[in-house]
Amino acid sequence: MIKSLRIKNLATIEDLEIDLEKGFSIITGETGVGKSIIIDGIMLILGEKSSKDMIRTGKAEISVEAVFLQDSAKIAWRELIPESEDEIFVQRRITEKKSGKGYVNGTLVPIKKLKELGPLLVDIYGQNDHVFLQQIEYQLHYLDAYADAGDLRKEVTGWARRIKKLAVEKDALAMKERDRKQRLDFLQYQINEIEKACLSPGEEEILRQQRDIFKNAEKIRLLVEEAQNIADNDEVCLSSLLSRLLTISQELSRFAKEFGEAHDAVSQFSITIRELSDFLVRFKEQHTADPEKLEEVEERLSQIEGLKRKYGNSVQDILSYLEKARVEYRELNSSQEKLSEIETTMTDHFDAYSAKAQNLSLLRKKQALKLAKQIEKEIGNLGMKKAQFTIRIDTTSPDPNQLHKLRALGVDEIEFLISPNPGEDLKPLRRIASGGELSRIMLVLKTIGKDSERFKTLIFDEIDSGIGGKTAEFVARKLKELATHNQVICITHLPQIASFATHHFKIEKDIVDKRTFTKVRKLTYKERIEEIARLTAGSHISEAALQNAREMLERNCQCSEKH
């Protein structure tokens, strides 16, 4: 709800400030004093279009400021305000050159954002461009709330979203079908090429070592023969010397036990030399010069280098690529199965959607008849006794071949229709010419609907157009009832409506030095009596008119001079 409103330099308003409260407030004033300018200011703060012609003559810019209590604003402005703040400060500034800037708690926000969030905070009835009329979807939401169809509609929406998600996935798979086949062929070629090579980890390092040995075979042969001679072949070789040394150490061990330990060490060394001799023999036999084997090794290394240029910097990289290619190939090869699975799932989902949407449609049609009768009765009490009201529901069966047109809100399109006067055709509510009739219809919709909104600001303009007497009193009672859960502000010329309000503001216009100034003030109890008397009797206020006004206040507002 709006706690306070300040308007500067808008038309005849130079600097006007209003402190508003919960409950039912009315604004009265002589014709032409500028009551509608207050509405214009509120609409600007809600992001409506502006014009440089609205700027007060001689001033540079319009400034409209409003403080909203957090109980209504916290959901709408959640991303812009801390949880700890109880009040939200919104400002709109408009200059001659620009449409202006918007601020929320001092933070600059796009005007478009104000426009989006405005309907969450304030509803203005009496303007033919109200969001309820502009967007038929709002009427559908209203009917569903009245019918307690929220849970069923959520199920319908859930099935629709799941189907559309699957449809997107299916289309993506279908579009990739040609690319899939080409990719499969390419992957198969790569897999075959790598598998044919029969690579093994560490193979390249072994081959390089073998190549070095084959390339240096002659040098290796000479070194091996020399090592064999040293170890075992020459007349003076390590084996002979060690054998002699073993004999000596064994003889000496009889004289000193330390030589026994030396004998063991020499014995171990002898074994090592024999093992080395055996290794040299085997190595020589295995690595004799072999040009054919060298060529095989070179060819294998060349093959590995070719694969490395395509698939990685090492044999391990090539093998890793092979595994990834196999996985991708399996996935692509199974995409046809996946496509079939998606189609089957979509069929099941579509059947579920159709069944739920049909149930929702039947519920809407049943409740629409009940709601239309109730609205027709209520607007009759508000002075539209001959009016006819109905809710048109057009149902289109869902087409499984056009899933992109599947509606998340079900298979129905609805619109509220009315014929305000006998002999006139039923027409969409949005085409009603009378602002007063529209305001009264919206008042009925608000009071009998199951709207989840609370503590919202509802502004009714022209609601008293063409009514009086008991009808006016009925309208006033509806407004007061609505004000128990919302902040209701009504601009009126009728004393019956004014007498039901908890708070009464009066708009006045003064001319000072040939300049017009519009101002507003909250009336005291005594001033309310005088204003209601003026609304009843005009400029010639009699004592009887004052007494009648006093009685109306005491009866309808339950307030007295003590209040």
Image: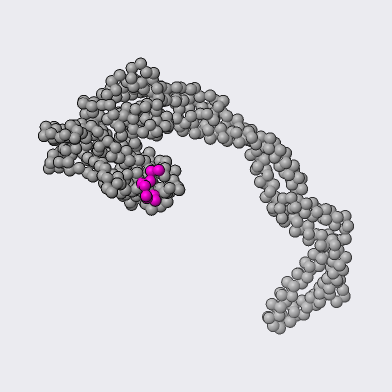
Instruction: Look at the magenta stretch and give its main secondary structure.
Output: loop
Q: Is residue 457 magenta?
A: no
Residue 282 screen position, x and y as percent: 82, 62
Residue 154 placement, left or right of 85: right
Query: 538 or 438, which lies in front?
Result: 538
Query: 445 or 62, which lies in front?
Result: 62
Query: 476 or 62, which lies in front?
Result: 62
Residue 190 screen position, x and y as percent: 73, 44
Q: Is residue 57 magenta?
A: yes
Which image quadrant is residue 389 in? top left
* Residue extent of the magenta highlight: 53-61
The quarter in which the N terminus is drawn is top left
The quarter in which the C terminus is drawn is top left
Residue 336 screen position, x and y as percent: 64, 33
Residue 243 screen position, x and y as percent: 80, 75
Residue in view at x 40 percent, y 22 percent = 427
425 above or below 291?
above
Residue in view at x 30 percent, y 46 percent = 515
Kindly tell me whether residue 443 is visible in this rendering.
no
**How many circles with numbers are drawn on the protein?**
0
